[in-house]
Structure formats: structure tokens, C-alpha cells
Amino acid sequence: MKSVGKEWGMILAGTALVALAYYLFMQPNEITAPGLGGVAVLISYFLPISLGLIYFLLNVPLFLLGYRFVGRRFVINSLVGMLSLSLFLWLFESLPGWHQAVAGTLLGGIVSGAGIALVLRAEGTTGGVDIACVVLNKIWPAFTIGKMMIAMNALIVIASGLVSDVLHSLFTLISLVVAGKAVDVFMAWGQPKGGESQAKVSTTN
């Protein structure tokens, strides 16, 4: 069992990587950040409610599910992850990005996937869809967290294609597949070969 300080340090490092991936590789190439933010944007097209309020309301039931199926420690660490990601997105917003669509798609996926895996290995998430993926992995452990992320985010991106162009939706799909694969690779990194095929987020109270 990791200490709280070590867990939060890993969460800070992971969310910093996710924020860097967004500003350095994804945003400059108009690659949409998938997840609950994409759902919130879609809903905002049809309801006259602020994007921030929609995102908050969507997160509430997910955090409750996380508490029910994974535990209090997971919810606390996920709150730390969500808040620290918001902080790093604010701190890094002036960073210059790399305008190269193919490289940005691949590197954005790899770096963000590594960051998400680091947060998951610290028994947390960045909130949103990540929580749903961890909960579903508890119910259906045959499906890795990375595969869950690919499936759920792919549905969101396909739906988002209704309000964005096909080319950038395609780049986003490729990036999220790379990110999901990277999550599984980095989750399994250093795990005993004879044991589980991936590190899992433990159930704690």
C-alpha cells in the first residue's frame, strides 16, 4: 500500500503529463480531448446551460459510483486528480505547441496515456470517463481499463463528429486508441509476468 504522499506525487506527475500532452500536441493540431468534456460540449449544443455546470453535474453520479464500487480513498485521489489537472491546464496554457498533425496525434496519445496510467497506479483518476472505466473494470475485469477508455471515448468522438469535421474526428479517434493502448502498457509495466496482466485499481474504504 502506497503512502498518501507518494500517491499524490504520482497523481501530480501524471496530471502534469496529461496537461502537457494537450497543449504541446493535441490543441495545436485541433485534436479534441475526449472524455466527459466531450459529452458536456455535446449537451451544451442542445441545452441553454453553462459548460462548467454541465461538466460538474455529469461528474457527481460518477464520483458516487466510484465511492460505491471502488472506495473512499479512490474518490479522494480522483478529486485530487481532477483538481490538479485543472491546475496544470491553467499553468501550461501559454506553452507553444507543435503543429504537426500526425506526430501530434501519436505523441499526444502516448504522453496522455502514460500520464493517465500514472494516476491510475496511484489509485486515482482525473475524474469523468476515467471513473466509469475503473468501475466497469471492477464489474467486467476481462476488459482492461485501456480498452474501456478506447470504447467509451470512441462513442463520444463519433457523436462529436456531428458538430466537428471528419478529419479532426479521425485524428482524435487515432489519438485515443494510442492513449488507451499506452494506458494498458504503462499499467502493466513492472508487474510480475506470472501475475495479473495489468495493474488494477484496488478496492479500498
Image: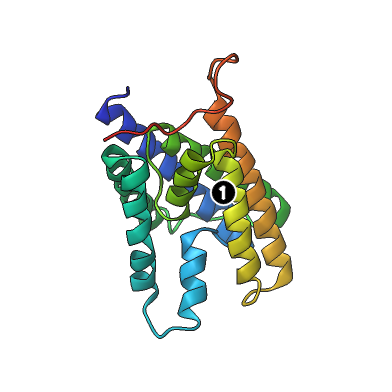
Identify the residue at image location x=47%, y=61%: 36
**Is residue 30 among the parts visible in the rendering?**
no
x, y percent for residue 135: 44, 45
Image quadrant where one finds the C terminus:
top left
Crowding at mark 1 (Cα within 10 Å: few <14, some 14-19, many 20+): many
Q: How many marks?
A: 1
Taking 135 as reference, is 187 left or right?
right
Taking 199 as reference, is 122 left or right?
left
x, y percent for residue 102: 72, 52
Q: Secondary structure at mark 1?
A: helix
Q: Nearer the viewer, residue 96 or 199?
A: 199
Q: Nearer the viewer, residue 137 or 1?
A: 137
**How are the colours assigned in the image?**
rainbow
Location of mark 1 (residue) = 149
Q: Quadrant of residue 181?
A: top right
Residue 74 vs 54, above or below: the answer is: above
Identify the residue at image location x=61%, y=44%: 147
Identify the residue at image location x=47%, y=54%: 129
Q: Residue furthest front?
A: 139
**Is residue 4 among the parts visible in the rendering?**
yes
Q: Nearer the viewer, residue 136 or 117?
A: 136
Disc 1 marks a residue whose amino acid type is: Met
